[in-house]
Structure formats: C-alpha cells, structure tokens
Image: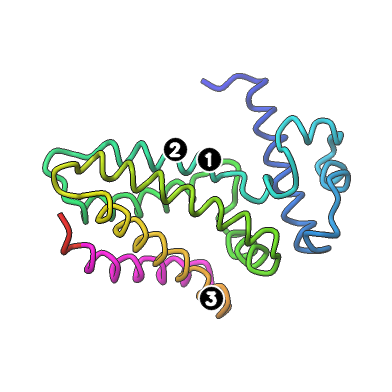
Amino acid sequence: MVGLRERKKQRTRRALIEAALRLFDEKGFEDTTLAEIAAEAEVSTRTFFSYFAGKEDVLFFDAPARLERTLDLIASREPGESLADLLIRLIRSSFEWAAHDEDFDLAVAPRRIRLVMSEPALQARALHLLFDSQVRLAEALHKTYPDELDEVEAAAAIGALVGATKLAAMVSVTKGDSLEEMGAAMVRAVEIAIRGIGSLG
C-alpha cells in the first residue's frame, strides 16, 4: 500500500507535469521558465529540481519507466511464445500502461507529440532516447530468443516495430486525428510490421 508521503510526492510530480505541458502549449517550450512551471504547480523551484533535472526531462518523464517495463515484458517470454506473439503482447501492454499511468493523461499525448515535432531541442532529445532504447530492446530480444534470432534480426524486429508505431502516431497527429484514430493507426502500423517480422524466428 502506498503511504501518505509517497502519494503526496506522486501528486506533486503530476502537478509539475501537467503545469509544464499546459505552459509549453500556451507559451512555447523555449519561452517557458522553470520558475513558471514551479509556480503553476504551486511549489518552489527547488522542489522542481527534486523531481526533474530540467524542462526536457518533464516532457520525457515516462521514458525510463516505460523502457524498464518493456524490458521486463520481453524477458517474460511465455513457453512456446513466438516472436510475433510477444511483440503483439508488448504493444497491447504499452497501450494499457499508457491508459492507466497515474502521472499522465493519455489525452495529452497528441499535444506532447506536436511539441516534440516543433522544437529542435526536443527532437534531438527524443532521437537520443529512441536510439538508446532501441539498442537496449534489441539486446533484450536477442537474449530472449538466442536460438531463433541473431543480433541483426533482433535489431531489425525492434526497429520495424518502433519505427512503425512512432511514425504512425506522428502522421496521425499531423492529420489532426482523434486519440482513438491515432491508436487505431498505431495498431494498423503494428500489424503491417508484424507481417514482415513473421518471417523471422
């Protein structure tokens, strides 16, 4: 059971995330200061730094936890589970995690994507995180399927899956699709990628 102190920390963290996203949307990323984010969340700037190292970290707040959950899921391969089945389970679980994340309202996902697409500094950070996570996921996938996949095949499978979902989400947001339409586009992209990945393993 989560204690009172931990619940208070979770509320403060969420308030900082929501305040930052709101201000980034209203004023722009570059023109929003850390002090403004802290004030909007009704905490001190010092408290801000107890949770985040900088503005960019607020926007990518869920990246470390998502990566760890994904690595854990890849390592949890069920007996006889094929590569395609594992990756489908991974995508479905990712949607469930996003929908039930206490720190993040899934409805603001399109806004976050638009911010990243419009700010060069955020694009650079996103690409760095994306590259690092794909390398780690490919290594984990190879370890989970050591007799079926070599390193190149594991890398290709992760690259296809991640590339398909990320680009589908970006295209959907650019078109002005609803959250439901964006989710459907990502699922469709996964199905297309999975058909190609099915030739592996």
For the rendered model, the colour scheme is: rainbow
Q: Residue at x 69, y 37 (%)?
A: 13
Whether residue 116 sits left or right of residue 85 in the image: it is right
Given the current orientation, which residue lies at the most extreme bottom position?
A: 175
Q: Assign a secondary structure to mark 1.
A: helix
Q: Tell me the CA gap for discs 2 and 1.
A: 6 Å
Q: Residue at x 45, y 46 (%)?
A: 97
User: Can you tell which quarter of the image residue 195 is in?
Assistant: bottom left
- Residue designated by label 1: 64
Query: Reading the chain from its start, which is encountered first: label 1 or label 3?
Result: 1
> Which residue is labeled 3 in the image?
177
Residue nearest the observer in this picture, 146 or 175: 146
Q: Secondary structure at mark 3?
A: loop
Magenta segment boundaries in residue numbering: 178-197
The kind of residue tagged 2 is Glu
Q: Residue 138, percent across and down?
A: 34, 48
Mark 2 — residue? 68
Circle 1: residue type: Pro
Give coordinates of residue 44: x percent, y percent: 86, 34
* Image quadrant containing the C terminus: bottom left
Q: Where's residue 21, x and y in %?
A: 72, 55
